[in-house]
Every structure is written in C-alpha cells, then in structure tokens.
Image (cartoon, grey):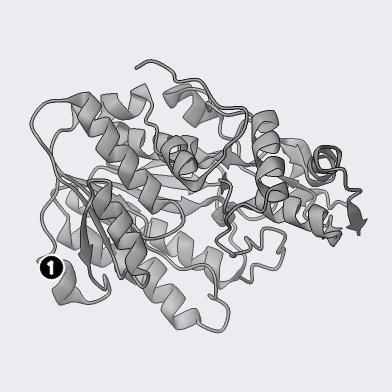
Amino acid sequence: MPTEPLPKKIESVEQLDDLLSRPTQPVVDALTKHPGDVIVLGVAGKMGPTLARMVVRAAQAAGGAKRRVIGVARFSNPDEQKKLDAWGVETIKADLLDRTALERLPDAPNVIYMAGMKFGSTNQEPLTWAMNAYLPGMVCERYRKSRIVAFSTGNVYGLSPVARGGSVETDPPNPLGDYAMSCLGRERMFEHFSLALKIPVAIIRLNYATELRYGVLIDLAGRVQRGEEIDLSMGNMNVIWQADANAMSIAALADASSPALMLNVAGPELLSVRRVCEAFGRRMNKAPRFRGTESPDALLNNGAFGHKLYGYPRVGIEQLLDWTAAWVTAGGASLGKPTHFQARDGKF
C-alpha cells in the first residue's frame, strides 16, 4: 500500500490517533491471508485502541467479505469504549477472568491477546499472576480453534550486557521479579496449549512502544522540561513507535505457528538515555540533569528478526525526538502513567 508522508509536527490527539492506526502492507497481507473476524482481548490498554483501529483500516484495505473487529475489556473509562465504537470496533464489556463471561464471547478465527497487569503489580502479586499466567490458559481453551497473537515483554530476558546489542529470541529467559516471572508464565501457557491443542501462536516480546501520551521518551522529555534529575543506572534502551509495534504484532498473525513463534518487537537502535536527554535538551532549550552512572547491562531487545519479516520501522528516532519534544513543550495530552523503565529490581 502507498506510504503516506509523515508530518513534521503532530498538532492534535486526533492526528496522533490517525498516525498510530495507519496499517502497513504486511498487516493488510496478514488479514488477506487469514480472513474472518478479529477479536482483541484487553483492548482498552495503552496500545489496544489504536491497534484495533488499525485492524479495521487494514480489513477495509484488504477487501473481501465483511469482518467484525471486536474489542473486549472491562472499560473502566466509558469514553474509551465510545471512541472504539466510533472507529468501527464492536466493543464488549467483560471481565476476562470471569469464565462465564469468557465463554460467552463470540468465536473468532483471529485473536490478539493484550490482557495483562504491570502497573501496580507490586503488592498485588496474586492478581498479577492470575491475569498474566492463569488467564492465558483459559483463553487458549476458549479459542482453541483460532490463531493467537499474544503480547508479552522483553522483561522476560532480564538484564543483558549493553555490548551484546540486546537479547535475541533464542536466548534463555531470566526474569527478575513477580511481573517478569508472571509474564514468562503467560508465555509458557501459550506455548503449552499451542503444542497440546495445535493452536498457531505468536508471542510478542515488546521493548518499548512509545507514542506522545505515554512511553519512555515522554518520561524522559518531561523530566528534562521540569528540570528533574534523570537516573542513569538503566543507561540504555530500545524504543519503537507504537504504530510500528502494532503493525508488526498484527502482521504476526500470518506467522503464528505450533510450536509458538517468538518475536522481539523493538526499534533498531540501541539508545543511550544520556544522549537522548541531551537531544531533548537541545530541542527544548533545557539543560538535562543526571545522577548516577550507566550500568553495563540493561533491558534490551534485538528486533532484527522482526524487521526481516515485516520491514524496518516507518518512524526513526530523530523523528520521534522531534515529535516528542514539540508535544511536551506545547503541553500536549498525557496518560499520566510513568513507564518505570528505569526499575532494575523488577518491581512495578
């Protein structure tokens, strides 16, 4: 499909949501190859709404028989549900841990699993494990005849030497803390049922999706603007524009397999926190303040395999820095949720 030009600056939430939901050709190809309805479980999170809208737009581009795009969540924010409805996503309000509610959900040959718990997982460890490790087994039993793309996290790898360039899909997991361990439990459940029930599965190990209302870059830019000290102990990172992360994840429907496919979704650059903050400082006319020194390891993914499958991300780091600095300087909307990416003890 034709590549639309990127704006020099993002002026509004509406323009942002449009950019975040632009599909790629691999997304259209995946939906063409696998027709039928798509259900997104846990659609009301940070990435889910624009991912679901991207599926709607790609399905229109793919043509063929009309398909439903269904988004399921608790929808504690009714405005999020209304927005999805307006975008052509059929919404269902449900608690996925309620087995009766899960069984009542419509069948769909294509499932994107985004449910999970990260923020507030410390001091809520039982619920974290229920959401992240028990629910996936329930979903696999309910959707045993479907293809499933399941979101996970690069945190399952644990800290990786910076000099190595990031963890790859064949590396053994080494999770630290209840959140990362429960996410590995989620992966193991999908792996088990993929083998036991022959479910085609793709597991997405993400580090880190960013947009202009949320993400590592917004965290750092905000601290530069406010003159806050920036901890350098987690001195390196990966970021990927959320639209590119969504696109690669949807496209993985085409490569879901049994045994499950493991796929890192990450930007191509290994980024220095110090240099990113200095770049924000130049753009915002603010001198960043730092504390501590860079550790020799960090939570890092190598996304080369995904780029080989689905193409290079459309938005590069310089564009992301420009957009983010302009958005923060203008007082753009924020979800108000810090990423805690700097945590080295696994506590979120």
| Quadrant of the frame with the C terminus | bottom right
Q: Is residue 206 above or below residue 257?
A: below
- Label total for image: 1
Query: Which x, y percent locates residue 267?
Result: 59, 35
Residue 61 quadrant: top left
Structural crowding at the residue carrying mark 1, measured as other residues with C-alpha within 10 Å and reported as few (<14), some (14–19) or many (≥20): some
Question: Would residue 88 be found to the left or right of residue 299 on screen?
Answer: left
| Residue that badge 1 annotates | 103
Identity of the residue furthest to the top in this view: 2
Residue 228 at x, y = what percent? 84, 62
Q: Specify the quadrant that holds the N terminus.
A: top left
Q: Residue furthest left?
A: 65
Q: SS at mark 1? A: helix
Q: Is residue 200 visible?
A: yes
Residue drawn at x 44%, y 82% as measured from the top left: 126
Above or below, 227 against 211 in this view is below
- Comparing 158 with 10, the one in front is 10
Residue nearest the viewer, comparing 301 with 224: 224
Identified by mark 1, the residue type is: Glu
User: In the rendered image of this protein, does residue 125 appear above or below residue 198?
Assistant: below
Report whether residue 257 is seen: no
Q: Please report the residue visible at 81 percent of the width from the left and 53 percent of the height from the top.
A: 224
Q: Nearer the viewer, residue 1 or 194?
A: 1
Residue 54 picture location, percent across and down: 34, 38
Residue name at image x 91 percent, y 48 percent: 287
